[in-house]
């Protein structure tokens, strides 16, 4: 049995007249960190707030390197000997001198497993948190430069004011983190849309303002020509508010780099000289970027750059295995003027002005396959690209606006994958901004390559909670590309002590999902670690074996307005052994099921409830929410016969069953690993999922 806390939908409408029936024990759902920033080279204390109790939390996990955390709030029982409901605790972060600035994922671990993720901004400036009564200009909080100003737009019509003294003419940059900190906050359904305004403190006149620059977050660079006192006003553009709407505004006179050109850099070179794009930069400036250690394949990376002797804020670049060229200075705005390029190649370019269109000509023979991928928004370019492949006369053959990765996450970059040339001749790749905008910051990298078979792999969750002696399930979904449709074997590394795994597979053909079932020893201690899941496959390519390896992308589930379930890619999946939870055991009448085509078989299921736990429980073998299925590791042609199953256990009920049916045309398969799950609602979207030991399903061959 298990306690893997993953999101599943409300199956069977687990509601009563008084509302949704909830689990007795739930993992913490982090909502905010106050302040939301920590200075590099310092140790600081922060208040972490969550939905559901963090009592007993013993570990803080932070993504990346150079930042560690510890819990400082005492975990003492109340005077009545009962556990208090701790929805606020203090944590201490220690940030190394060389830690890379930017946003880190943060979570705590305790008896109820790993929490959802929060966000921590690592900054080079001293951190200042807003004081009370700074909501009017005459109560503006006096701050120094440089600093990172933190606060919250905590209620409707809340406006925060900070007073800055400019002693001499200079350029000051204001970089706001707000909305971008909330994409991973799974239960925060409305996000802040901050606007920042600089005003003259004496007259109240607006000097400069900024709204949407990095998504909904503003960036403002202002040349202060006149010394004096100024006010920085921070609010939601709609005058909305929420106590969880934390922000961090980096205020500095140092140059701020938003992009670099070229964007794509060949791995073959150890260092690169780049043109920076940004604010407050000296004229004719060049940056130096070193190839990060361990970069052996194509990757999008945030790297630290040097501007003379100073280190800049991190910027995103693409390290490529392809030869990399740069857009010609000659006009390439039409198919007739297209710049000639070879395939494969990496092309660095820029949509220099509004209405600019860039064209690249390549030769292909009938049947040749070409893939084109744009890197722009993912590395903070202003370009919202649309890419087309044209005939030489300009007739459009195929186009794409937004690309989708892992089958469930959309980027504003573009991709044309596995295009097939219809005839011998020359063709043109055309790229432009979808709104025909342009400028210095509209840089891009075109990855133009011969498509190879591969697969993407995503985990449906970012955390798994297992009780001692229990089991946990992790689902992986594959998106198979460019002719690959074979079997994928799953693997797992980095399990915590006392936890073992049985790794399943994703079947060939139409199958997309597989699972790994974890089991904790009965004497396992409270322990947690971040794991890494990979998928491997072998296929024949022109008579030679081709080995494919993919690292799975963890996805945190998010609670969307209206009760929808979505995902956000994150950096860690945490497996934690916790205390026993609401369901203590899950027993099956059989774990080996053999079905003939057209045959049905029943699996009897018994759950052991914790004392006093009378909430509804839903049994399932599919991972779903409402009408959407997020994982189905059953063999092709095998389905659950809902009419012949009892999956809703109400009140004190402990026994149910699931009937599986193999279609008459179900293809044969041997011992496909599956899980029987018992689900308990945490809220309308989030579920606690308890798993059985592995169930192996075989579909016999038709005689």
Image (spheres, rainbow, N blue to C red):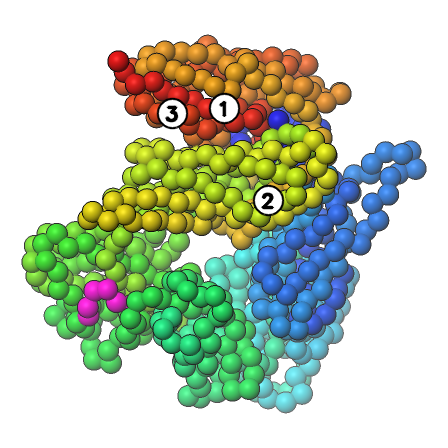
Q: Which residues are magenta?
A: 341-346
The earlier-in-sequence mark between 1 and 3 is 3
- Secondary structure under tag 2 reads loop
Nearest to the eye among marks 1 and 3: give it.
Answer: 3
The quarter of the picture where the C terminus appears is top left
The earlier-in-sequence mark between 1 and 2 is 2
Q: Nearer the viewer, residue 422 or 12?
A: 422
Q: Nearer the viewer, residue 245 or 492?
A: 492
Q: Look at the magenta stretch and give its main secondary structure.
A: loop
Looking at the image, residue 71 sits to the left or right of residue 623; the answer is: right
- Secondary structure under tag 1 reads strand
- For image coordinates 51% across by 81% down, the residue present is 306
Residue highlighted by disc 2:
495
Q: How far apart are labels 1 and 2 at the CA level?
A: 21 Å
Residue 527, how many percent across, how many down?
69, 44
Q: Residues within 10 Å of mark 3 (few under 14, many from 20)?
A: few
Q: Residues within 10 Å of mark 2 (few under 14, many from 20)?
A: some
Q: How far apart are labels 3 and 2 at the CA level?
A: 27 Å
């Amino acid at each position: 049995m298990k306690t893997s806390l993953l999101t599943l939908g409300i199956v069977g409408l687990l509601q009563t007249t008084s509302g949704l029936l909830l689990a007795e024990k739930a993992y913490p759902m982090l909502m905010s960190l106050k302040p939301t920033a920590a200075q590099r080279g310092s140790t600081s204390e922060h208040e972490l707030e969550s939905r559901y109790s963090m009592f007993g939390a013993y570990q803080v996990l932070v993504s990346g390197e150079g930042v560690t955390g510890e819990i400082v709030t005492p975990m003492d029982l109340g005077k009545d000997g009962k556990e208090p409901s701790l929805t606020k605790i203090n944590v201490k972060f220690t940030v190394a001198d060389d830690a890379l600035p930017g946003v880190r994922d943060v979570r705590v671990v305790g008896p109820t497993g790993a929490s959802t993720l929060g966000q921590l901004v690592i900054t080079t400036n001293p951190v200042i948190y807003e004081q009370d009564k700074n909501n009017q200009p005459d109560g503006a909080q006096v701050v120094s430069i440089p600093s990172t100003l933190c606060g919250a737009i905590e209620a409707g019509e809340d406006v925060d004011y900070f007073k800055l003294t400019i002693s001499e003419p200079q350029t000051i940059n204001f970089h706001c983190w707000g909305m971008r900190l909330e994409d991973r906050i799974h239960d925060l359904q409305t996000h802040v849309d901050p606007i920042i305004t600089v005003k003259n403190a004496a007259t109240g006149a607006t000097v400069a303002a900024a709204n949407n620059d990095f998504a909904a977050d503003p960036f403002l660079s202002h040349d202060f020509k006149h010394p004096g006192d100024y006010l920085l006003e921070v609010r939601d553009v709609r005058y909305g508010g929420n106590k969880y709407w934390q922000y961090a505004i980096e205020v500095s006179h140092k140059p701020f780099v938003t992009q670099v050109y070229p964007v794509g850099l060949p791995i073959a070179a150890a260092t690169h000289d780049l043109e920076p794009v940004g604010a407050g930069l000296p004229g004719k400036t060049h940056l130096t970027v070193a190839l990060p250690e361990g970069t052996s394949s194509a990757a999008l990376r945030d790297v630290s750059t040097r501007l003379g002797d100073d280190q800049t804020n991190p910027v995103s670049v693409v390290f490529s295995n392809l030869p990399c060229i740069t857009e010609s200075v000659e006009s390439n705005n039409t198919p007739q003027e297209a710049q000639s390029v070879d395939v494969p190649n990496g092309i660095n370019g820029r949509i220099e002005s509004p209405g600019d269109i860039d064209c690249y000509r390549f030769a292909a023979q009938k049947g040749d396959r070409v893939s084109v991928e744009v890197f722009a928004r993912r590395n903070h370019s202003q370009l919202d690209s649309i890419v087309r492949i044209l005939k030489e006369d300009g007739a459009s053959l195929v186009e794409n606006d937004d690309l989708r990765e892992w089958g469930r996450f959309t980027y504003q970059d573009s991709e044309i994958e596995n295009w097939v040339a219809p005839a011998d001749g020359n063709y043109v790749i055309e790229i432009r901004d979808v709104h025909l905008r342009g400028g210095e910051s509209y840089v891009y990298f075109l990855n133009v390559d011969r498509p190879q078979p591969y697969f993407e792999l995503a985990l449906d969750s970012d955390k798994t909670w297992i009780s001692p002696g229990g089991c946990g399930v992790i689902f992986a979904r594959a998106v198979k590309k460019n002719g690959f449709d074979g079997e994928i074997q799953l693997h797992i590394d980095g399990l915590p002590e006392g936890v073992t795994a049985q790794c399943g597979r994703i079947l060939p053909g139409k199958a997309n999902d597989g699972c790994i079932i974890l089991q904790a020893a009965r004497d396992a201690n409270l322990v947690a670690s971040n794991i890494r899941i990979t998928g491997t496959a072998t296929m024949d390519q022109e008579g030679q074996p081709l080995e494919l390896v993919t690292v799975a992308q963890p996805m945190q589930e998010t609670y969307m307005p209206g009760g929808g379930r979505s995902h956000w890619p994150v950096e860690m999946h945490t497996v934690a052994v916790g205390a026993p939870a609401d369901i203590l055991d899950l027993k099956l009448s059989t774990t080996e099921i053999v079905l003939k085509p057209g045959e049905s078989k029943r699996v009897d299921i018994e759950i052991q409830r914790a004392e006093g736990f009378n909430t509804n429980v839903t049994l399932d073998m599919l991972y779903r929410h409402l009408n959407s299925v997020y994982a189905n590791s059953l063999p092709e042609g095998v389905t659950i016969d809902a009419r012949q199953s009892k999956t809703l256990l109400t009140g004190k009920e402990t026994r149910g069953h699931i009937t599986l049916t193999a279609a008459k045309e179900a293809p044969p398969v041997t011992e496909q690993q599956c899980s029987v799950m018992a689900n308990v609602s945490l809220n309308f979207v989030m579920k606690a999922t308890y798993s059985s030991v592995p169930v192996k399903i075989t579909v016999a061959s038709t005689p």
